Image (cartoon, rainbow, N blue to C red):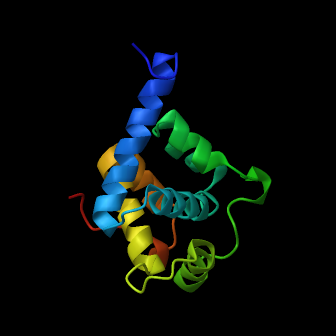
Amino acid sequence: MTTNGLPVFDDTVQKTNIWLKELMERLNLESRQDAYRAFSVTLHALRDRLPVNTAAALAAQMPMLMRGIYYEGWKPSKCPTDDRTEEEFVDGLAAAFNFTEEDHEPKRIASAVFAVLMDKLSPGEVEHVQSCLPYHIKNLWPATPD
């Protein structure tokens, strides 16, 4: 018996909830909404700094619902963005996150999102994505998967 009437929808909701739960655990969040927002903002910032083909290849490994979050508002003709420094990346995240808690600083949130990606995506895809990023942004990724 399916909840949404189509097994493919149930599957993507289940997988997306697993990704959200993992991020909530990594960041000690109680709100699924905060986890969603952290994923959305970080994935958009990452996507916009990748070449279009790399961004699409990354999305192909995500659950369908996460892909929708990832692609929301995307303008491929404007990618990759010119802002490539860690400061520009982190400042953009900070403005978009708008978290008030002191322990939810942007670098920590981005690193946690990247850790979930490392856990859920193929090592080859993670390596390819990282190879397209400037050193300072690549440095926000965990050294090895947990």
The residue most toward the left is 146
Is 41 situated left or right of 119 in this image?
right
| 6, above or below 83, in the image | above
| 22, above or below 82, in the image | above
> Is residue 121 visible in the rendered structure shown here?
no
Please identify the quadrant where the C terminus is shown. Answer: bottom left
Residue at x 45%, y 59% (from the top left corner): 35
What is the tally of numbered marks visible in this picture? 0
Residue 1 in the image: state x and y as whole percent.
Answer: 39, 12
Residue at x 39%, y 61% (from the top left corner): 114
Is 20 situated left or right of 88 in this image?
left
Residue 51 in the image: state x and y as whole percent.
Answer: 63, 55
Quadrant for residue 3, please give it: top left
Residue at x 52%, y 16% (from the top left corner): 5
Between 5 and 57, the one nearer to me in the picture: 5
Residue 75 in the image: state x and y as whole percent.
Answer: 76, 53
Residue 49 in the image: state x and y as whole percent.
Answer: 61, 64
